[in-house]
Amino acid sequence: MGESPGSRHISVQPKGSLVPQPQRLMLRHKLHSLLYCATPGSLPQCYATDSTLYSATSGSLPQCCATDATGISTFSKRCNSCGLVYRYQDWIHGVHNYNDRVLLSIHLCLFLQFLLQGHVAVGRLRTILQRTTKVKYPREQDFLHAYLHFEAMTQHEYSYSCVKCGHHPPIVIMDLHKKGVFNMPVSDISAAPENFDGEVNSEEFWDTMSMEMVASGLLKRGETNPYRVKPSYEYWAPWIGRETRKAPTVVNTEWQKVQSTLPPDSTTDMDITEERLCDEVMKLKVADVRRLCKACGVGHQGSKTDLIIRLKGEMQNRAAYDKIFQKVWGASGGWAAILCPCGIVYSVKFLVRAESPRDFADLLFSWKHIPNICIYDFARGLATHANLRRPGAIPFTPFEGRLAESTDDNIKAARAGELSVDLPWLREKGTTEAGGHPVTGSSQHYVLYDRFHEANSRDPRDALRRLQLVPELAGQVNTQVAEQLFGDMRRNNYYLNMMSPSTHIFMVRSLIQVHNDLKNQAMRHRIAQALGPQQNLGLDGLGRLIIEKEMPAALASVRPNKTTWGRPLSLAQREQLANALRDGPDPVVEQPYQVSLEDFRSLAGQGEL
């Protein structure tokens, strides 16, 4: 940026509150102030663009624009040899450059980021600012793309991991957000290529998605974005945290929902999308069901049950099924999510067709370690589907993912609430088995129903998938974390569902990232308060919070307080003392806190212990 008559340039340091902290905000792409093109003999040509700087309030403008945000020119350089353009894209002045005409203060960008967590659309904020500041803001679409440009240029980790459960949670809850959809007729998607094996490079896909947002600031109005991504079967990837997934290449086999290659006798056990769609139709009001019947050319007279029976018969026709599906679900299939019991999202998959257990199997097969306990509202379908897809290494064993063998006695005891299945490795890691989970050491994998869906199954064997049968899980796991997340995200549907597919999924991934960050920060804060300010918290090799072993310098001179030694010890303290003083190797009282004989000797001089 440079000066021209009648204009000002942004080159002075703004107010301290506007300077982005390096540890909090970093440019995704390292850009430097380049003076010349690398082409030999090239000379730069400078040109100016009239710009306007927008901020949340006039008090948050940089010092150079303390009174107003107009009269600014953005200077760029264009190589006269290759035509490459160099433009201002630094954040050191507290300004984000979208397209040389629209500039956003970093304060406004961060304000927008957290405002979205409050379910306020970018367009609504634009209207409010325009009316209160009496400044004409850019078009709503340009304002939204300017914010998305900022998010794409920000170096987010998108770690999708919980600081309590680590990178590989042993217990997960899986569910579908049916109402989170984008406009996309299913008929617009072409069939997958014959040689497609269902593997997609997730990093490459999401980098292309980010480049679409970045390129929007470089294109002239009306130009086609070369990085635009359209929904397809062969190039559409979920997002899974880098430490959680096996590799950048993930599994997406949605195209096989159209042409099933599994045996006919097994498809009824897992692929019942028509029945699941009927369940959703049952939740509609009578007036909505009548309108749906009219749209499908079905008789709309009679009771609600009569109408649903007619629609169910019509669903045998694929065209009618798609029409009913779009009316009930929206255009796309919503998005599937896998969460830990703390409510942190680990994986998200944006569906182009109706949900089936295949979608969650794709996500789990992309994980480095399949969780020991998977809680899902169609547990039997997921276990059957996954085991049929991997017959050589059956993922859900023993007992096909049930808690006990499906004998008449076990089923009867489970229904009566008299069966109890103890899984001690959920409390404390046992001996690591071959292929065992890194947190529990167990190689057992179960698929269970939550309390609110266990009565939905008509198979008597599913009584052995009840969460309440496991003492370590009953009353200990919040199985509604997914519903709570969807309830919160549902308040964003009024603007998310109006977006294009690429904008929709980019925005949702960003919203979930901020959601995860806020939950992890709150969890860190609670743990730090419980342990006291003297403890240093860090992450172990599995991504879980632990107390750092190094003692802070401020505690190096602290000595034992002998005045308290005469007080009687509590039962827990006596047990820990006896455990630490027993013969043999240094014991571990409770992971990750280690109490050894040497620790007790350090509390007093020789002969005093």
Image (tube, rainbow, N blue to C red):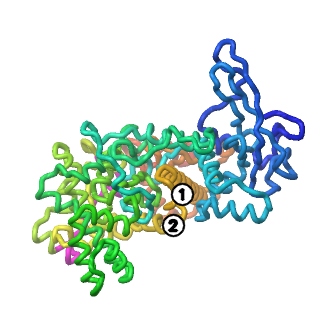
Pick the front one: 372 or 485: 485
Question: Circle 1: is it few (<14), some (14-19), or many (20+) Cα within 10 Å?
Answer: some
SS of the residue under disc 1: helix
> Looking at the picture, does residue 485 appear above or below residue 148?
below
Which labelled disc corresponds to residue 515?
Answer: 1
Q: Is residue 155 above or below residue 114?
A: above
Check contact, mark 2 vs mark 1: CB within 8 A. Answer: yes
> Which SS type dominates the magenta stretch?
loop
Q: Which is closer to the viewer, label 2 or label 1? A: 2
Given residues 110 and 232, the one toward you in this image is 232
Q: Residue furthest right?
A: 5
Q: Position of residue 111 (x, y in %)?
A: 68, 56
Q: Quadrant of residue 83?
A: top right
Q: Quadrant of the N terminus?
A: top right
**Which residue carries the number 2 mark?**
488
Name the residue: 42% across, 61% down: 341
Helix, strand or loop at mark 2 = helix
Magenta residue check for 417: yes
- The answer, for residue 181, to whether it is visible in the render is yes
Magenta segment boundaries in residue numbering: 413-431
Q: How far across and how far down the image is residue 392, in percent?
A: 16, 43
First in sequence: mark 2 or mark 1?
2
Q: Amino acid at mark 2?
A: Asp
Q: Is residue 374 left or right of residue 242?
A: left
Badge 2: residue crowd in 10 Å (few <14, some 14–19, many ≥20):
some
**Residue 174, image x and y in percent?**
36, 60
Q: What is the C-alpha distance between the residues marked 2 and 1?
A: 10 Å
Please give left or right for residue 504 compared with residue 87 in the image.
left
Question: Amino acid type of disc 1?
Answer: His
Specify whether residue 426 is painted magenta. Answer: yes
